Image (tube, rainbow, N blue to C red):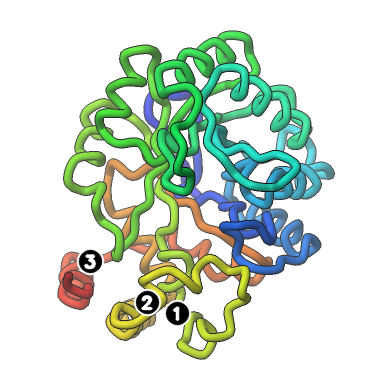
Amino acid sequence: MQTRQLGRTDLHITPIGFGAWAIGGEWRFGWGPQDDAESVAAIRQAVSRGMNWIDTAPAYGLGHSEDVVARALADIPRAERPYVFTKCSLVWGEDRIVTHNLSSASLRREVEDSLRRLQVEAIDLYQIHWPRWQAVSEPSPGSVEEAWHTLAELKQQGKLRHIGVSNFTVEDLKTAEAIAPVASLQPPYSMLRRAIEAEVLPYCLQTNIGVLVYSPMQSGLLTGAMTRERIEGLAASDWRRHNKEFQEPQLTANLALVAVLRGIGARHGRSPGEVAIAWTLRQPVVTAAIVGGRSASQVDGVVGAADVRLSTEELAEIETALPRG
């Protein structure tokens, strides 16, 4: 794959990176049971197919995703290893309840824990996972200002090579930028989730902040493999069972959109999911897309998105097929 420069950093990354959310296994926001051997195989397949970065987070499986990433990369020569990006701000205790914390002391502990789990001396890109988190009712310790000062200090100490953010608004970005440069933003973006087009993407383009979009296939809904029967059979611990896009009345319209993507994909010899990923990459401001994979075969089914170039007519066809409201 060709590479693109991530914002103002010296990182040149492939248009698709491996997303390690699902391989964390079962937790409050998990994707159901996951076999670690298949996760390792998926990561190694992603690297062999050219992806040069992996995105994970401590919260994914409460440390388990980072452990699996380290296991998958252990036998790969250091010079050939992909970049590893991870996050901070979501923490847990012995009760396994996830809370939100932006205090300096908590972030410093998180960095040390991630370095240990990932078995690296420095983290290539370290991101604040959430500036605020709706899953907690109590005010979180710390603030964006305190957190960003802390990450900037850890970067100067050499523990973090680059620092970025996730799920930030334009105002959050401005707050951080007043303290130290933001390397990248990781926002949700797909055909079914386009809120960032109004303000966030223009701001990132103006300020040269790299953009790593997540859930470009709307958490598997736009892959072409998601049927009503498969949705009904999702594990009880799979968070998607409670997501509105997987329920009526949205589901019927979303599956109709997938049928259109399948027709467009057939012209390119690609899957509906690859068309959905390519749609996000059409934006010049989008550096790359994070694409999850739970098996080597799933990885093989998405890597072709990097080579898909949608025509003006195809983009218009997709726009017409998008669910309204």
Residue drawn where x is 66% and y is 40% of the image: 92
Asked if marks 3 and 2 touch (Cβ < 8 Å), the reply is no
Give the quadrant of the C terminus: bottom left
| Image coordinates for residue 273, horizontal then vertical, percent | 43, 70
Q: Are marks 1 and 3 in contact (CB under 8 Å)?
A: no
Picture quarter containing residue 297? bottom right
Say which residue appears at 56% left-offset and 33% top-offset.
Answer: 88
Which element is circle 2 on? helix
As measured in the structure, the alpha-carbon distance from the residue carrying label 1 to the one carrying label 3 is 21 Å
Q: Which residue reaches farthest front?
A: 138
**Residue receiving disc 1:** 224
| Distance in Å between CA atoms under marks 3 and 2 | 12 Å
Q: Secondary structure at mark 3?
A: loop
Pointer 2: what residue?
Answer: 265
State the SS at label 1: loop
Residue 89 percent coordinates (x, y): 54, 33
Q: Is residue 248 above or below residue 95?
A: below
Task: Decide which of 245, 70 is in the foreground and name it.
Answer: 245
Q: CA distance from mark 1 to mark 2?
A: 10 Å
Q: Which residue is labeled 3 in the image?
A: 311
Q: Are marks 1 and 2 in contact (CB under 8 Å)?
A: yes
Could you tell me the amino acid type at mark 2? Gly
305 vs 150, nearest the viewer: 150
Check disc 1 and give the amino acid type.
Gly
Compared with 105, 138 (above or below) is below
- Mark 1 or mark 3, earlier in chain: 1
Can residue 5 be seen here? The reply is no
**Residue 135 position (above or below residue 321):** above
